Image (tube, coloured by chain):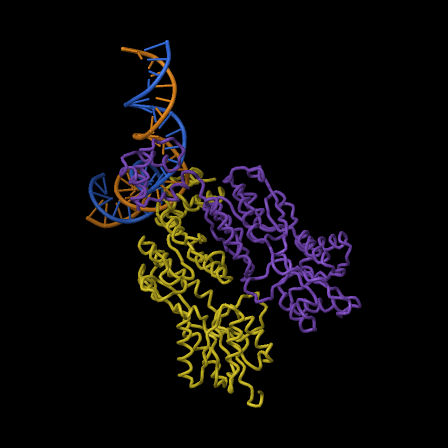
Chain colours: A yellow, B purple, C blue, D orange
Amino acid sequence: MATIKDVAERSGVAPSTVSYVLSGSRKISEETRARVLEAVRDLGYHPRASARTLRSSRSSVLALAVPREAGKYRAVDGRFAVEISDAARVHGFDVLLMTDPDGVRGLRRVAGSGLADAAVLMAVEEADPRVAAMTAAGFPVALLGHGDARDETEVPWVDLDWEAAVALAVRQAAAVGHRHIAFLSSADHEVAARRGYALHGLAGAHRAAREAGVEVTVRPSSDDPGTAAARVRELLATDRPPTALVVQHLIPLPQVLAELTASGVRLPDDLPVVPVGTIPDESGLPDLPRIDLPVGRMAAAVTELALTAAGALPATERRPVAGGPRHELLEPRMAPGVPIAPPRTPDAR
Amino acid sequence: MATIKDVAERSGVAPSTVSYVLSGSRKISEETRARVLEAVRDLGYHPRASARTLRSSRSSVLALAVPREAGKYRAVDGRFAVEISDAARVHGFDVLLMTDPDGVRGLRRVAGSGLADAAVLMAVEEADPRVAAMTAAGFPVALLGHGDARDETEVPWVDLDWEAAVALAVRQAAAVGHRHIAFLSSADHEVAARRGYALHGLAGAHRAAREAGVEVTVRPSSDDPGTAAARVRELLATDRPPTALVVQHLIPLPQVLAELTASGVRLPDDLPVVPVGTIPDESGLPDLPRIDLPVGRMAAAVTELALTAAGALPATERRPVAGGPRHELLEPRMAPGVPIAPPRTPDAR
DNA sequence: TCGCTTCGTCGAATCGTTTCGATGAGGTGG
DNA sequence: CCACCTCATCGAAACGATTCGACGAAGCGA
């Protein structure tokens, strides 16, 4: 493996000159420059990352802490990982995957050993111990998703604006004529635990109902598909049933759709269903009008926040304070494609 | 940040002594040992990874090259990434995610800069240019999946034994009484391209048919769900239709099941469907008797192959030759859970 | 021609660890 | 009492890059 010394010898200059040619941090004559670059090409020289890091104490590596609740794996996490890696490369960073079941230990190791310059923490729980540990260690982090815990106000994070997302779904349904809309919210336990996205989703439903002057009936969903399906049945079994259904909790979505079909609702014409969140690409579900989790935008934003906190990005207008906490609520968008069907004419039922 | 010098001073020894305590590569008196370890704890000392790597030229990092065909992302890749990371940690390695759209460039960069000691290449294409590039550079790699390309015989790889997998599905169906079994194989273009898994799956179906003395009707699947559904219809529209269906191509599986339901087949009783491969966890499909891609076993095996090739694992009986090519075909297993239903009695149709 | 600035390049120190050979204290046998 | 060996520890030399100050040559005005 060629070193900077080999390049220097081959081009008849000092190692420092090679370094200056490569970094461009000092002026070098065009002639010398050309000779050095030729030697670099000839030898296939790559600077050793470890030497560079040792000297500069910057690794150009971003750690990515993947949530690992006992063997569980959410399909969307893989997409986030890939998108974050892409975003990091744009800024010259590589991504180190951290799947340590004890997230705090793994992060301490990576931060302490200088393997990474910053970390992105995915799917942050309320009062996440990882946040506290990294804040205490002075290690730059950015969070994907957020709760309402106090320590998180000190730390940059990115999240979808769930309130705006559910509100948008309701508003769009109202816009094509729906006057009574059902909202299958997050699961019971998520609401009970006062998870941010659960509360914000509910708030969005209520706000949009008020603003658009439509009725919104809310029922919590459940992780148990059977229970979720039952809730849908309850939503529909009234004198004046809703004509559209907005769904925030997508785990039992297939079963919800199956339940609708089974009870004689013809999809999508009889009852437009609008999921808010992420439908796995390979789920085989029909195309629905929907609001997707903006994975790409979230990944780009959280990466930039983490690198800014690490002082690796020049301050911009959007993100002026290097190292300071910044929060970004991303604006939801309707997925292009299937529009929300208007309600059927009164005689339809 | 504490360095080895700080630890040395605090415990009143030389830096080298601290190093010996930590690595255990020389005998140190119990008393000194205790004093050093106490200082390490007190100062929260972590060895700087870059210094260690610079000195030893081993990074303890495994690069993971994720396939990136133009924006596509397969859900199973994320699971592989997480499982490989877990397996690497067992051996003290971290995983660097490589999502560079130009896989060769990314690998060259990581290999050349010494960021990683070895690489795992996912979803290898026939005559993958990455394999040739890394072989030429003398960089240790292991492949997840394999083709029949010649250069791959020189490189370690891991794959599911697709021939055995399809054969197992057919054999199990035969064992519960099915005499005529349909096999929806890989897609046309995969067979035409002579992809290993496609050919091996076909071979397995034929072999099991011979050995079990049953009839197997084969039809290629298609990436287009409509075409795939049509193929299924063809399979069933005969005088003596098959009583079980083995499916290797799982992308259009939801549509295949929908087609069956639509044409009056009651699942799973009328016609057991046995997928061979990976069904996404969140697909909402019913429980089926199936043969899963053994993601965990494949990840562990490919990680060990890569690290062995890097000389980072002691040679074992199973993997005796460090650096030499090793190939592992993993034995398929029926997923625990739903068994294959026996054929309905003759009067059923 | 002298002194001063500018330009391009060099030498040396530095980052933090590992590891090889050296060193001194203490023990043992002749 | 001396020679020798073992044992625990130390000092110094790498590893390969970056970067600061120095330095000679050339250019310039006086």
Q: Looking at this view, is A16 or A123 the one in front?
A: A123
Q: Going 34% across and 34% down the picture, which residue do you hit?
A: B16
Q: Answer with left or right where residue A210 lies relative to residue B80.
A: left
Q: Looking at this view, is A292 or B254 the one in front?
A: B254
Q: Answer with left or right where residue B38 lies relative to residue B98.
A: left
Q: Looking at this view, is A24 or B56 the one in front?
A: B56
Residue at the right extreme of this rendering: B239
| Label total for image | 0
Q: Position of residue A6 (x, y in %)?
A: 44, 38
Q: Position of residue D17 (x, y in %)?
A: 39, 44
Q: Quadrant of residue C23?
A: top left
The C terminus of chain B - image quarter? bottom right
Q: Is residue A195 visible?
A: no
Position of residue A157 relative to residue A45, above or below, is below
Q: Looking at this view, is B215 or B194 the one in front?
A: B215
Q: Position of residue A131 (x, y in %)?
A: 35, 58
Q: Quadrant of residue B53?
A: top left
Q: Is residue B111 visible?
A: yes
Q: Position of residue B210 (x, y in %)?
A: 77, 53
Position of residue A297 relative to residue A345, above or below, is above
Position of residue A62 relative to residue A177, above or below, is above
Position of residue A63 relative to residue A173, above or below, is above
Q: Answer with left or right where residue C22 lies relative to residue B107.
A: left
Q: Going 33% across and 44% down the picture, which residue do you hit?
A: B45
